[in-house]
Amino acid sequence: MWRPGSIGMVGRIVLVLVVAVLLELLGNIALHRWQDPELVSAEQTRRIAAKLAVAERVALASPPGERGQAMAELASAPMTLNWVSRTVITNFGASPTRLGKLRADMVGAEPSLGERELRLTLMPSAVKGQRDLLGARQLADGSFVTFRVSPYLDAPPHPGAVVALHLVLVTAVLVTAVLVVRALVRPLRNLAEAADATGQGRVGSIEVEGPAEVRRVATAFSAMQARLLKTMEDHTQSLVTVSHDLRTPIQRMRLRASLIDDREIRETMAADLEEMEYFIDSTLAYFRSGEEEAARLVDMAAIAMTVVDMADDLGANIQYHGPDVLEVWTRPLAIKRMLGNLIDNARRHADRIEITLSDPSPDYFMIEVDDDGPGIPADRRDEAVLPFKRLDLEGGKRRGGAGLGLASAKRTLEAMGGKLSLGSSMLGGLKAALVLPRLEAE
């Protein structure tokens, strides 16, 4: 039994092409019929032929001087009759045109009309946009009975109107084809969106639909997604567990180091332990995307000023610039982690730090972190956001770190639909700009 999903991608593309060609063909046939309609109906053809046969008999039975009067008395609307000894009417009824078919139909209705010449032609009517049928029937004595049917039929449409209608037809066919193709590739688009979501550690919705090839890919990808996310979750959970387990021995070592009498050794060990703890915190922050936190309405200005005050208490030369109040829907804990990472990163390389909060659009807000450190060369900024990548540029105050500050901020921002950009600061160092979307209530 045929099922919609049994048609492959190639088959569906061929079907779209066939449907488009058929629509174009049917549309052209309809336009042709409208552009070149039938001249007259069969009944009207029989009436014209019968009237012309009667006119021939009446003309031959009347003296030449009275034939014109006899034809005028015989005529009736919309057909007029006349008798002439000679005529200039040109014959187009012998050619394989509509007039040729009309002449054959008239002879079929009145066979006597086929015995001598029967001329048919068209000319413009007194009514604008219409045409009259002119004809001449030769009599036995060589004279002619002429006739005119007015108005006979509509004139051909204006070429501009015909071209416009053809363009409308082509546009309609193209739009229909594009809509069908869009529906055809929709499963692929959904699959790509699910792949992007999986790449960011989120579960993308995968619907097994579309052509047979796409259905097979979606089924395989769904199974792969489940395995991949399970592996990522296991690795993250293992890392979190190990990180937490390491804190206890670090605290014990910190306590024992404080009991060492040699000050130089004590301070060196304390610095190493602090570096280990910082590395653990940075690694945990990197693997937190921020999606575990629901968006809520917060005062972003208050959060930024709080982070600045905390850094100032730890000895940083830091200032805040921005509004006193800025209420937005966002994930505050994720933003605090990002700001903390960026401020700590700036403290490692600079003496002065400035945090600027701005609200340039109804759709997003910005937080800029400027410092007076050595900065990052433009050709190495892409490298700087790679995880566990430590550039250790000349001019920095301190070395070390996990190489995760910028990478963690970039990862969290992308999960929130934001963007991290690095540039040159007016202070002479690095500018890290966080573009954050205004989220909706969850």
Image: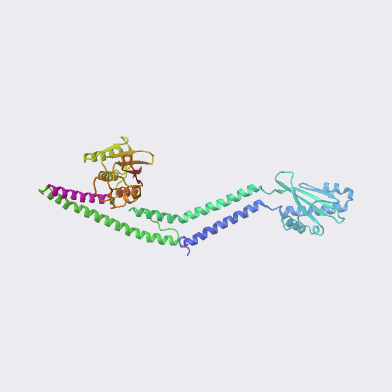
Residue visible at 50% across and 52% down? 179
The residue stretch that appears in magenta: 263-285
User: What is the residue that sits farthest to the top in this orientation?
Assistant: 324
Q: Is residue 23 visible?
A: yes
Number of marks present in the image shown:
0
**Does the magenta stretch mainly form a helix, a strand or a loop?**
helix
Which corner quadrant of the image does residue 429 belong to? top left
Residue visible at 59% across and 50% down? 167
Q: Is residue 213 above or below residue 306?
A: below
Q: Is residue 431 above or below residue 207?
A: above
Which corner quadrant of the image does residue 316 belong to? top left
Which corner quadrant of the image does residue 365 belong to? top left
Residue visible at 39% across and 53% down? 193
Q: Is residue 314 magenta?
A: no
Q: Nearer the viewer, residue 266 or 190?
A: 266
Q: Is residue 174 left or right of residue 330?
A: right
Q: Position of residue 17 (x, y in %)?
A: 53, 58
Q: Is residue 289 visible?
A: no
Quarter of the image for the C terminus: give it.
Answer: top left
Q: Is residue 270 magenta?
A: yes
User: What is the residue that sits farthest to the bottom in this orientation?
Assistant: 1
Q: Is residue 95 left or right of residue 261?
A: right
Q: Position of residue 359 (x, y in %)?
A: 36, 38
Q: Nearer the viewer, residue 211 or 340?
A: 340
Q: Position of residue 369 (x, y in %)?
A: 31, 42
Q: Is residue 367 left or right of residue 53?
A: left
User: What is the residue that sits farthest to the front in this orientation?
Assistant: 394
Q: Position of residue 409 (x, y in %)?
A: 31, 47
Q: Nearer the viewer, residue 321 or 269?
A: 269
Q: Nearer the viewer, residue 196 or 38?
A: 196
Its colouring scheme is rainbow
